[in-house]
């Protein structure tokens, strides 16, 4: 009897599994990220939902294991979202799937495959590619395929659907998503600005979702326990009346766990918006603010509209009058930029004291208008993802590598918050110049920008502060010791020991004679 029950359960499981004729999948950068696009596709599959499952993986999982889990669903169609951060891994996965199951229909979509003829090699392995918006086009394609109709073209141009006609994806955030992942949301789509380094430059304008219906969805998520909301709107503060209404909505539900992330334009902060921002408790808002460059000539060249004076005033106001966490962005490698010019933008931004400055290296996004400058400014990109810039007419490969290392060390020292007391002493009155000197010396000493233990990093920073930046040893010890204690690390730093430093304690490349001189 027990054997019969087990057999029936197994048959039922196989039957249910065989009903999943469509698998929607992608490889996220990290588990904490939820695939918002897949949920939109699933929400708009109408009657095909009953035959569809969403399966998410990360780029850290092996292609063989992912393929095994996908094929266990026994699907006929697999739809995969492809992005700049996962295209290499997706290419490997599609190759494996086609080797094991040649009859499987693979459909690709996403930004990385949406700009023919500039397409990655994985498109040659797939059966179909949906470019652009996929909510309607993927449904139409699957309907044809499941009815054994053959579409005329492999390349299918996505059809945009008016926002009111789109089914909402928010109900498909499950308990696991709400508990352990970021909930991505959008109150609008598109962007009216034409900054050429960004794919949003291809949008005609920004279109809002109906505010009442959107807030109802946010309330449903909140009631289910969601507390981490990341708005992916390109310009959250474009229409200030809507921005204020959304902020008021969350203020009315403020508790100890609520955290909101918005991408904002830096030169639009009218009084109505300021008033509501001042009412938020500390550390409940994060603003991602794209400054990119303060150089007006480069801004004009790349079609970026930005009032630099208002940007400076608004960033200063946000730091002085709100508890918002400011994550600001600069881009190195833009056409016409130089090392010296970038240093000026960096120094201006440091003076405004945001909590984070992300130093982004220009990347070649397929379809981005900035590609029109490639020949004139001799923009040379890495041929493999993430297609980062390697050199330009005005920036050598050597300097590009130096700034890459600068960016990595800046994350470890400037953005981490672990060197909060030490950082002003490092930067002095020439932030970029002095931190670049620190970065060069750290790399010469360690030979790496990765896998440096925090205690060792403290000791290396001390060596460079004293020996290269010529900071007084007692002052260096004082500020580093305070930061070390704040980090709650165990043990003592090498400069606190009575005996001279050794190579083993400081790292390869720093001589004993120099160590004694620094002490």
Image (tube, rainbow, N blue to C red):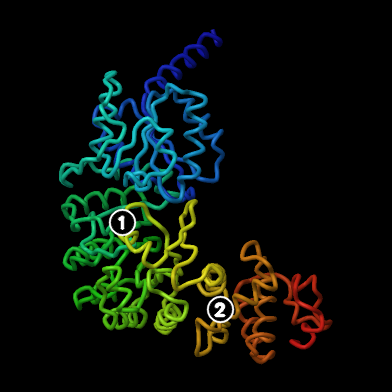
Q: In the figure, residue 148 lies in which quadrant? A: top left
Q: Residue at x 77, y 88 (%)?
A: 517
From the image, which quarter does the C terminus lie in?
bottom right
How many C-alpha atoms fall within 10 Å of the one at disc 1: few (<14), some, or many (≥20)? Answer: some
How many C-alpha atoms fall within 10 Å of the one at disc 2: few (<14), some, or many (≥20)? Answer: many
> In the visual, does 200 lie left or right of 409?
left
Q: In the figure, residue 18 lies in which quadrant? A: top left
- The answer to whether one can see residue 327 in this image is no
**Residue beneath disc 2:** 436
Q: Residue at x 68, y 71 (%)?
A: 455
> In the visual, does 483 lie left or right of 392?
right
**Image label count:** 2
Q: Percent x, y for residue 28?
A: 45, 46
- The answer to whether one can see residue 110 in this image is yes
Vertical relation: 481 (above or below) 199: below
In the current view of this chain or complex, which residue is farthest to the front? 376
Q: Earlier in the sequence, mark 1 or mark 2?
A: 1
Q: Secondary structure at mark 1?
A: helix
Q: Residue at x 53, y 89 (%)?
A: 428
Q: Residue at x 59, y 80 (%)?
A: 437
Q: Percent x, y for residue 46?
A: 24, 31
- Residue 251 is marked as none
- Residue 199 is marked as 1
Using the numbered discs, state the Cα–Cα distance from disc 1 to disc 2 in whole angstroms. Answer: 31 Å
> In the visual, does 490 lie left or right of 17?
right
Q: Are marks 1 and 2 in contact (CB under 8 Å)?
A: no
Vertical relation: 361 (above or below) 140: below
Q: Secondary structure at mark 2?
A: helix
Q: Percent x, y for residue 44?
A: 25, 36
Vertical relation: 320 (above or below) 491: below
């Amino acid at each position: 009897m027990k054997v019969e029950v087990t057999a029936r359960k197994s048959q039922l499981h196989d039957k249910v599994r065989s009903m999943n004729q469509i698998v929607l999948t992608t490889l996220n950068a990290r588990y904490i990220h939820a695939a918002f696009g897949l949920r939109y596709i699933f929400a708009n599959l109408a009657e095909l939902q009953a035959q569809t499952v969403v399966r998410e993986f990360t780029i850290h999982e092996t292609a063989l294991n992912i393929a095994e889990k996908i094929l266990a669903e026994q699907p006929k169609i697999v739809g995969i979202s492809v992005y700049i951060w996962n295209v290499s891994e997706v290419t490997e996965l599609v190759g494996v799937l086609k080797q094991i199951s040649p009859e499987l229909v693979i459909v690709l979509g996403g930004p990385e495959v949406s700009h023919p003829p500039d397409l990655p090699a994985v498109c040659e392995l797939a059966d179909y590619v949906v470019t652009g918006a996929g909510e309607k086009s993927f449904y139409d394609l699957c309907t044809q395929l499941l009815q054994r109709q053959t579409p005329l073209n492999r390349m299918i141009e996505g059809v945009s659907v008016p926002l009111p006609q789109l089914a909402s994806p928010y109900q498909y955030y499950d308990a696991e998503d709400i508990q352990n992942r970021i909930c991505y949301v959008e109150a609008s789509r598109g962007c009216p600005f034409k900054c050429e380094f960004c794919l949003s430059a291809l949008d005609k304008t920004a279109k809002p979702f109906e505010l009442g219906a959107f807030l109802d969805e946010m309330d449903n998520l909140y009631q289910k326990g969601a507390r981490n909301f990341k708005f992916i709107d390109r310009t959250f503060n474009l229409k200030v009346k809507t921005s204020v209404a959304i902020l008021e909505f969350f203020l009315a539900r403020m508790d100890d766990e609520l955290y909101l992330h918005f991408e904002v334009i830096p030169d639009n902060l009218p009084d109505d918006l300021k008033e509501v921002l001042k009412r938020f408790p500390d550390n409940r808002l994060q603003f991602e603010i794209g400054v990119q460059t303060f150089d007006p000539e480069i801004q004009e060249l790349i079609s970026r509209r930005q009032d630099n004076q208002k940007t400076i005033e608004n960033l200063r106001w946000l730091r002085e009058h709100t508890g918002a966490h400011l994550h600001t962005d600069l881009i190195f490698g833009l056409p016409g930029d130089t090392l010296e010019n970038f240093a000026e933008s960096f120094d201006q931004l440091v003076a405004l004291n945001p909590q984070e400055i992300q130093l982004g290296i220009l990347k070649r996004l397929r379809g981005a208008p900035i590609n029109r400058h490639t020949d004139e400014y001799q923009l040379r990109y890495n041929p493999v993802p993430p297609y980062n810039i390697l050199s330009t007419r005005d920036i050598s490969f050597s300097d590009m590598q130096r700034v890459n290392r600068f960016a990595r060390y800046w994350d470890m020292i400037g953005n981490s918050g672990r060197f909060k007391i030490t950082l002003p002493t490092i930067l002095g009155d020439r932030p970029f110049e002095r931190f670049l000197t620190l970065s060069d010396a750290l790399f010469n000493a360690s030979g790496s920008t990765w896998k440096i233990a925090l205690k060792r990093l403290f000791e290396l920073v001390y060596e460079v502060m004293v020996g290269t930046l010529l900071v007084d040893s007692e002052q260096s010890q004082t500020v580093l010791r305070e930061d070390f204690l704040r980090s709650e690390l165990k043990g003592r730093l090498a400069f606190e020991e009575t005996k001279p430093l050794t190579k083993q304690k400081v790292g390869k490349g720093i001589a004993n004679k120099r160590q004694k001189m620094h002490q």
